[in-house]
Image (spheres, rainbow, N blue to C red):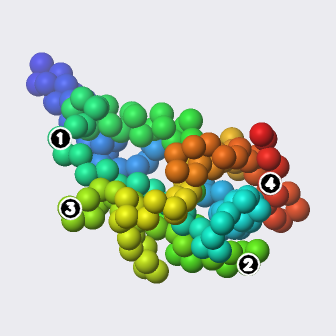
Amino acid sequence: MKKRYYLLFAVVLALFSAYHIFITTDLFVPKQKEITKPKELFRQMFSEITKMKNKSDTIYFVIYDIHGICGNNPKPHLSEFQRKLEQINYNKQNPFFINIDKSIDESNFINTKVIISGITGGCPGSNNCFRSGVTNFDINSKKDIIIYRQNYKIVNENTVEIVVTANFEEKMKLLMKYKNGKWISKKLN
C-alpha cells in the first residue's frame, strides 16, 4: 500500500516539475529566425519612398508610434500556462521576425534625400510629436511636413510585403524579395 502512495507522490511531483519547466523555460517554444539583411530591406524601401514626389529634401519616417493610453488592455488576464501556449502558437505562425529597432538607422542619405527615422508620441503634454536623436518637434505645429510610416508582413524568409503610408494615407504597396544576396522591390499598386 505504501508503494502506491510513493508512486502517486512521484507521479504528482513529476507533473508539477514538468509544469514548472514548461512555464519557466523556453524549451518548448519554437525559435524565430531574423530575416536576412533587414537593414538592406529598409534601405530599399527608403529608396522607393525617395522616388515619390516629395517637396522637401528631408523625409520623416516613423519606426513606431507610442500611444499613452492607460488601463485599456483589450486582452483578458491570462494564466502563465495560457501565455506560454499563446507564445508557442505565435512563434509557429510567425517563424521569421525583424528587429526594427536595429534595422532602421536614425538618419539615412538616399537619392539626394535625408531620411530621419524616429518615434511618435510619448511627449510630455502631447502625444502628437516626432522624436529622434536628430530632431524633435510637435507634429501639429508643422502642417506641411509629411510623416511616413510602414506596415510589413513577413510572407517567408525571402519575401516581405510592405505598405507605406504618408500622413496615414496609403501611398504604396511593395513586394520585397531577397534574391542573389540583395533585396529587390516591386510596386504592387
Residue 95 percent across, percent down from the top left: 59, 45
Question: 10 Å neighbourhood of mark 1: few (<14), some, or many (≥20)?
Answer: few
Question: Quick check: 51 left or right of 57?
Answer: right
Q: Of the numbered discs in the image, which one, if any, rests on residue 185?
A: 4
Residue 36 percent across, percent down from the top left: 70, 61
Q: CA distance from mark 3 to mark 2?
A: 35 Å
Query: Of callouts 3 and 1, which one flags the residue occurring earlier in the amino acid sequence?
Result: 1
What's the amino acid at mark 3? Gly
Question: 10 Å neighbourhood of mark 4: few (<14), some, or many (≥20)?
Answer: many
What's the amino acid at mark 4? Ser
Name the residue that disc number 1 marks. Answer: 71
Question: Quick check: 80 left or right of 120?
Answer: left
Q: CA distance from mark 4 to mark 2?
A: 19 Å
Q: Residue at coordinates 76% horizontally, 51% vertically from top-left? A: 176
Question: 10 Å neighbourhood of mark 3: few (<14), some, or many (≥20)?
Answer: few
Regarding mark 3 in the picture, which secondary structure is present there? loop
175 in relation to 130, above or below: above
Occupied quadrant, residue 47: bottom right
Name the residue that disc number 3 marks. Answer: 125
Q: CA distance from mark 1 to mark 2?
A: 44 Å
Q: Is residue 18 visible?
A: no
Name the residue that disc number 2 marks. Answer: 112
- Taking depth in this image into account, of 6 and 61 the one nearest to the observer is 61
Q: CA distance from mark 4 to mark 3?
A: 40 Å
Regarding mark 1 in the picture, which secondary structure is present there? loop
Q: Is residue 188 visible?
A: yes
Q: CA distance from mark 3 to mark 1?
A: 18 Å
Residue 53 percent across, percent down from the top left: 72, 59
What's the amino acid at mark 2? Thr
Query: Of callouts 3 and 2, which one flags the residue occurring earlier in the amino acid sequence?
Result: 2
Q: CA distance from mark 4 to mark 1?
A: 40 Å
